[in-house]
Image (cartoon, grey):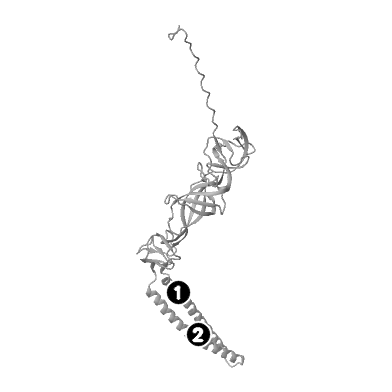
């Protein structure tokens, strides 16, 4: 018997609520611009520069610039006192004048000796002179000619020495070969220098209006690059700012310090960048992006929804049909980057692919470039 009374009965418990429908997460294929890029790190280097040494041997007695100075073409940078004394130069010039006077006198004697020899030759043909007189005149003429030749040789030797000394004095100044910036200096007043000596340049001049980017590219990425490939870079010195250029050269030997046993191989890829405001400096580090493929208004989907390709290079994905049911679809992929892939066939914009990934950017948006 119930405590509620004789007529009370127990009601059955209500049934549990049905489980919520399983939500299938999808992402939508969209129209977007997409780029496939190769990423690399690098350094800025000088593009045009000149290392200036000593044109003559001597001692530096004047330094008229310093590192950081902007100079015009022809500006005097260094002055060198050559190892040629004024007294030696003047002595050579005096000796040269004396030798020329001696040559004039000797040529007059030679002309007289030639005249005497011609007379003796005529007299001998007429049997009007002795053999001794004829031979004597010929010997005098030959001696005069030899003496004239000796003086000429001495004159040439003295002229050469005088010219060298005079040229040395004329080249005692080192000037800028073109307009630019002094980026290196080892010269100091009192320093003894030798013409064409080995070692650091006395002065280095560089044109900083254009610089070279030297990027180290991994060997697996080098085949994607060629002369003219578009490139851009950023540098920590100017966050958010981009510079642009095109590949000039791929150096065909491994970069320094790479390619050795147990080390990855890298290759240097070079391109130039304008620097009209001189913001960029040689030695700055760069983060480089090479655009190896680009598609406009392509059908894109997140890379994460793709698995592995089959033997035909196609990818299997689940695409939701009009009734919301997933249907297997095989698609072909083209350009890809770190986040997105281009669908070449098997998928259209607006279709939803099963997967839990962020949607691609909206129509007309550029997909952020990333490495392969």
Task: Kindly state the secondary structure of the residue where label 1 is placed.
Answer: helix
Asked whether, in this view, residue 66 is left or right of residue 326, the answer is: left
Of residues 245 and 304, the one drawn nearer to the viewer in this rendering: 304
Asked whether, in this view, residue 189 is left or right of residue 141, the answer is: left
Is residue 255 visible to us here?
no
**At 53% from the left edge and 54% from the top edge, which residue is drawn?**
246
Position of residue 274 relative to residue 153, above or below, is above
User: Where is residue 357 drawn, in percent x and y?
Assistant: 52, 37
Local crowd size for mark 2, using a 10 Å CA cut-off: few (<14), some (14–19), many (≥20): some
Asked whether, in this view, residue 47 is left or right of residue 345, the answer is: left
Of callouts 2 and 1, which one flags the residue occurring earlier in the amino acid sequence? 2
Position of residue 123 relative to residue 197, above or below, is below
Q: Are marks 2 and 1 in contact (CB under 8 Å)?
A: no
Mark 2 or mark 1, which is nearer to you? 1
**At 50% from the left edge and 56% from the top edge, which residue is drawn?**
272
Asked whether, in this view, residue 192 is left or right of residue 122, the answer is: left
Judged from this view, the residue extending furthest toward the right is 312
Which disc number belongs to residue 152? Answer: none
**At 46% from the left edge and 76% from the top edge, which residue is drawn?**
159
Label 1 sits on residue: 163
Disc 2 versus disc 1: distance between alpha carbons? 25 Å
Which disc number belongs to residue 107? Answer: 2
Looking at the figure, which quarter contains the C terminus? top right
Is residue 246 visible to us here?
yes
């Amino acid at each position: 018997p119930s405590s509620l009374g004789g007529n009370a009965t127990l009601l059955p418990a209500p049934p549990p609520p049905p489980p919520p429908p399983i939500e299938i997460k999808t992402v939508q294929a969209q129209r977007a611009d997409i780029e496939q890029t190769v990423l690399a790190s690098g350094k800025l280097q000088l593009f045009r520069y000149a290392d200036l040494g000593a044109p003559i041997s001597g001692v530096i007695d004047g330094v008229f610039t310093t590192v950081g100075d902007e100079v015009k073409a022809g500006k005097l940078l260094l002055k060198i006192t050559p190892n040629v004394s004024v007294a030696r130069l003047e002595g050579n010039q005096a000796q040269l004048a004396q030798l020329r006077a001696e040559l004039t006198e000797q040529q007059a004697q030679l002309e007289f000796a030639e005249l005497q020899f011609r007379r003796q030759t005529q007299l001998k043909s007429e049997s009007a002179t002795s053999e001794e007189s004829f031979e004597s005149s010929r010997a005098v003429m030959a001696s005069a000619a030899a003496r004239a030749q000796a003086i000429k040789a001495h004159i040439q030797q003295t002229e050469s020495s005088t010219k060298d000394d005079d040229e040395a004095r004329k080249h005692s100044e080192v000037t800028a070969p073109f307009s630019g910036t002094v980026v290196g200096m080892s010269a100091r007043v009192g320093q003894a220098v030798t013409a064409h000596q080995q070692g650091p340049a006395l002065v280095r001049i560089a044109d900083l209006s254009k610089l070279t980017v030297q990027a180290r590219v991994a060997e697996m990425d080098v085949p994607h690059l060629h002369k003219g490939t578009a490139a851009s870079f950023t540098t920590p010195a100017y966050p958010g700012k981009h510079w642009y250029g095109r590949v000039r050269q791929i150096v065909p030997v491994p970069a320094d310090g790479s390619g050795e046993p147990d080390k990855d191989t890298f290759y240097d890829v070079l391109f130039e960048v304008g620097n009209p405001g001189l913001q960029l400096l040689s030695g700055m580090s760069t983060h480089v992006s090479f655009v190896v493929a680009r598609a406009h208004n392509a059908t894109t989907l997140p890379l994460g929804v793709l698995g592995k390709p089959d033997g035909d290079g196609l990818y299997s994905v689940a695409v939701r049909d009009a009734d919301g049911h997933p249907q297997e679809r095989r698609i072909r992929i083209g350009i890809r980057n770190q986040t997105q892939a281009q669908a070449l066939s098997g998928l259209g914009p607006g279709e939803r692919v099963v997967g839990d990934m962020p949607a691609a950017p909206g129509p007309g948006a550029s997909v952020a470039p990333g490495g392969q």
